[in-house]
Image (cartoon, rainbow, N blue to C red):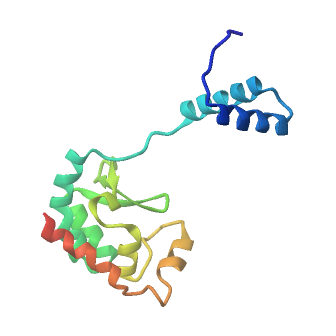
Amino acid sequence: MERMQLKLSVEMLHAAAAIARERDVTLGQMVRDLLAREISRHHNARPPVRADEQLIAPLRARLASDLALSQDWGDLDQRLKAKGYVLRAAGGGLALHRWPQDTRLCKASELGFSYSRLMRRFAAPFPGQAHTWLEEKFLSSKTKGAPEDAPDLQVIDQV
């Protein structure tokens, strides 16, 4: 092992030493364990799956009226496919894909249309969505037709 000098404030040194005593390890071992966990976390962290804004802005403009004016999931599917896109269930939400290639482009929420808002507006879950708890959460009698649907329609004005 190599030696390393570390500068700490007196308060931090005393607090760290107390924690090390509670864990029945040396302060050096505690620092090595913390660094090992941080290095592992860094190497195993998944990068965020966020689409580039240069891709999102044109998609938002192209699809805003279809997303805002569709009457149900079937209507939305037809409108999107007519323009070469389709929605797919993705985790607890929806993702926009190219049609028919099925290449993922972005999350529906990045376009300004979250799954929960679309579900409330259509009063139905997305066909094939495996997360049934979302239906229970967002389609209870309290949330059906909630005014939170209104921001979806405002996207048209922003484009």
Residue at figure coordinates x 65%, y 35% from the top left: 12
Q: Could you tell me which quadrant the N terminus lies in? A: top right
Residue at figure coordinates x 41%, y 72% from the top left: 116
Name the residue at the bottom extreme: 141
- How many numbered circles does the render carry? 0
Compared to residue 128, the image places residue 96 above or below, namely above
Task: Please name whichever residue, 137 or 35, is drawn nearer the observer in this view of the structure.
Answer: 35
Compared to residue 89, the image places residue 47 above or below, namely above
Q: Could you tell me which quadrant the C terminus lies in? A: bottom left
Residue 88 spot, x, y in % from top left: 39, 59
Residue 53 spot, x, y in % from top left: 24, 47
Name the residue at the right extreme: 24
Residue at figure coordinates x 31%, y 59% from the top left: 86
Compared to residue 119, the image places residue 143 above or below, namely below
Residue at figure coordinates x 15%, y 60% from the top left: 61
Determine which quarter of the picture holds residue 80. bottom left
Residue 107 spot, x, y in % from top left: 35, 56
Name the residue at the top extreme: 2
Compared to residue 122, the image places residue 23 above or below, namely above
Task: Please name whichever residue, 3 or 98, is drawn nearer the observer in this view of the structure.
Answer: 3
Q: Please state if 102 lies on the left or on the right of 64 as rendered.
A: right
Q: Please state if 159 lies on the left or on the right of 22 as rendered.
A: left
